[in-house]
Amino acid sequence: MSINTKNYSYVRNKLLNKEEIAFLDVREEDPHAQEHPLFAANVPLSRIEFDAYGKLPNKNVPIVTLDDGEGFAELAAQRLIALGYSDVSVFENGVQGWKASGGELFRDVNVPSKSFGELVESKRHTPSLSAQEVKKLIDDKADVVVVDVRRFDEYSTMSIPTGISVPGAELVLRLPELAPNPKTKIIVNCAGRTRSIIGTQSLINAGIPNEVNALRNGTIGWTLAGQELDKGQSRKFKEVSESTTTEAAARARSVADQAQVKRVSLADTEPWKSQSDRTTYFFDTRTPEEYEAGHLPGFRSMPGGQLVQETEMVAPVRGARIVLSDPSGGGVRANMPASWLAQMAWDVYVIDDVKSSDLKEKGLWKAPLPTLPIVPTADAMTVSNWLKTDSNTIAIDFSTHANYVKGHIPGSWYALRSQLADAIKQLPQVDRYVLTSFPAELSHFVAQEFQGLTKAEVVVLEGGNSAWAAAGLEMEKGPSHLACPPLDRYKRPYEGTSVDPAAMQAYLDWEFGLVAQLGKDGTHHFWVL
C-alpha cells in the first residue's frame, strides 16, 4: 500500500492557521519523551486500534503519523486507513526530518501544558514560596492551608506534611470552606511546577480573598531542600454548601467570560457528535465518582485539572473543539479548566443547561472500539489448568508495564506489541502461547500478528486479566519476566519516592527553559489572561 507523505511546512501551516491536524507520534512513550515536536501527540502504534475511535472521533481529520525511522509511522498509517480514516499520511523523514527543517524538539511528556504553565508564570509573576519558607510556616503552626492539586493517587504516594488533596479543578469550589478566614495563607503544591502554577493562578484569577502562593518546584523542591515528605495520607476536600457553590460558580463564570469561553446548550451539541468536517471532544470535568454515578451520554470522564495538564493525551487533534460539562458543581469544574484551555488556543465550550435527568449513563467510560478480530480463545479456568499441567504453555501479557507490575498471571511474560519480533526471541519456545492483557481487547489485536511470527498455537484469554482475577485465581506482582524493555512508560522525574536528586534538578532546569523553546517553535497561539 502506497501512503502519502507530508512535510514540515504542511504540518506547520496547519498549526499556524489553527486548522485541525492529528500529528501523531506513534512510538512508545519513552522514546517519544526523549524528543518530539511540540504538538506531536503520543498515540503508540501498539494501542492504535484501542485508542483511535475515542481519540480521533472524526474519520475525516487530517492525520500525519511520525516515528524516528523505525517503520512504525507507516504501519500506524496502514492500520488507521484500515479503521476507516480517509486522510492519513506519514511525516517525511521522521523526527530527524522535523529537526533538519528547523523545527524545535521538546523533551518529556505533556509539554504543551507544561510550557503553557511556564508562560503563565512568566507573564503573571505567579507568587510562590520556597520549600524552606513553607516548612517554617508549618513548623511555626502559622494560619496556613496546604492544598495538593494532583490526582489523589499521586497525593497518597507522597505529600507535603499537613497537605489536603484538592485536585486542580476543585480548588475554586472547595477552598472557601477549607479556609473560611481570608487571613489564612494558601499554599498550592504539585510534584513539580505546572499544576501548582495553574492552581495558584486559578485562585487569584477567581478573586479568592486569601493570600495564595505556589510551593516553588513542588515535592521536587521539598525533596531537594532535604525535607521529609509524608506517605500514604488520605486527607481530602469535603462537600460544600449551596451558598459556597453559588458564589464559586459566579467567580468561575466571570473568569471563563474574561477568557472568552463559549457557551452552548445541550441540544446544540448533539449534531457535533456526528459532524464529518469537525472534531469535537466531550469531557465531564467532575470527580470520577460523580461521573460514574451519572453522566451525559457520549461524555468521557476527565477531571478538569488533569485535562489542563494532559490535554494532548485525550485530545490529540490540535485545532479541535472541546465541550465541557459540570452539572453538579455550579459549572465551576468546567468554567475554570475552560478558561485555561481557551488561553491554550482551544475552541472551548461549556454547557450550562444540563439537568440531573439528562445524566442517563452510569459507570466508567468505555472506549469505542472497532470489531474485535476473530481469534482462538480460552476461559480463565482452562488457561489456569494448562499453565499448571503443561510446561509447553506460557502466558504473555500485553498490558502496560505499570499494570503488569501491579498484578499479572504468575509466570506470565511482559511484552510490547511494537517490540513483538524482538520479544518473541526472548520468550521460551513452547507449543502454546496464551495472550492476555488489561484491557482485555488489546490482546485480541495482537493475536494475528503474534501467530504470523510463530508456528506454535496462539490463544487469547477471554476477558484478559480482569477475568482471571474475577475467577479468584492468584495474581503475581512485580517486574518478574520482561521480554522487552518497558518503553511504554517514560519515568517522570517527579513520580515515586526514589528519584535521583540530579534527575529532579535537571527536570526543573528543563522546565525553566520551556518559555524560550516556545518562542523558537512559534506554533502555539498561547495567550495569558
Image: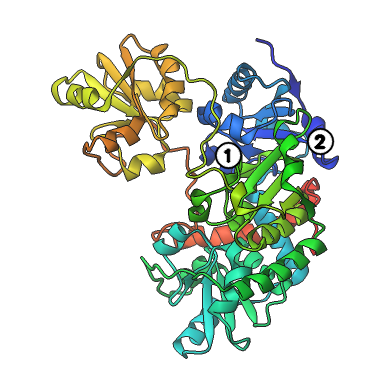
Disc 1 to disc 2, how far (Cα)?
21 Å
N-terminal label among 1 and 2: 2
Q: Are marks 1 and 2 in contact (CB under 8 Å)?
A: no
Residue 321 x %, y %:
75, 43
The residue identified by callout 2 is: 14
Residue 506 in the image: x percent, y percent?
A: 55, 58
Disc 1 residue crowd, few under 14, some 14–19, many 20+, Cα 10 Å = many
Q: Position of residue 75 (x, y in %)?
A: 58, 20
Residue under the point 58% across and 74% down: 175
- Which residue position is annotated with label 1? 32
- Image quadrant where residue 8 sits: top right
Lateral position of residue 269 relative to residue 297, left or right:
right
Amino acid type at image mark 1: His
Question: Does residue 317 sit above or below 260 in this rendering?
Answer: above
Name the amino acid, label 2: Lys
Secondary structure under tag 2 reads helix
Q: Nearer the viewer, residue 442 or 468?
A: 468
- Could you say which is closer to the camera, residue 451 or residue 507? 451
Residue 407 visible within the image:
yes
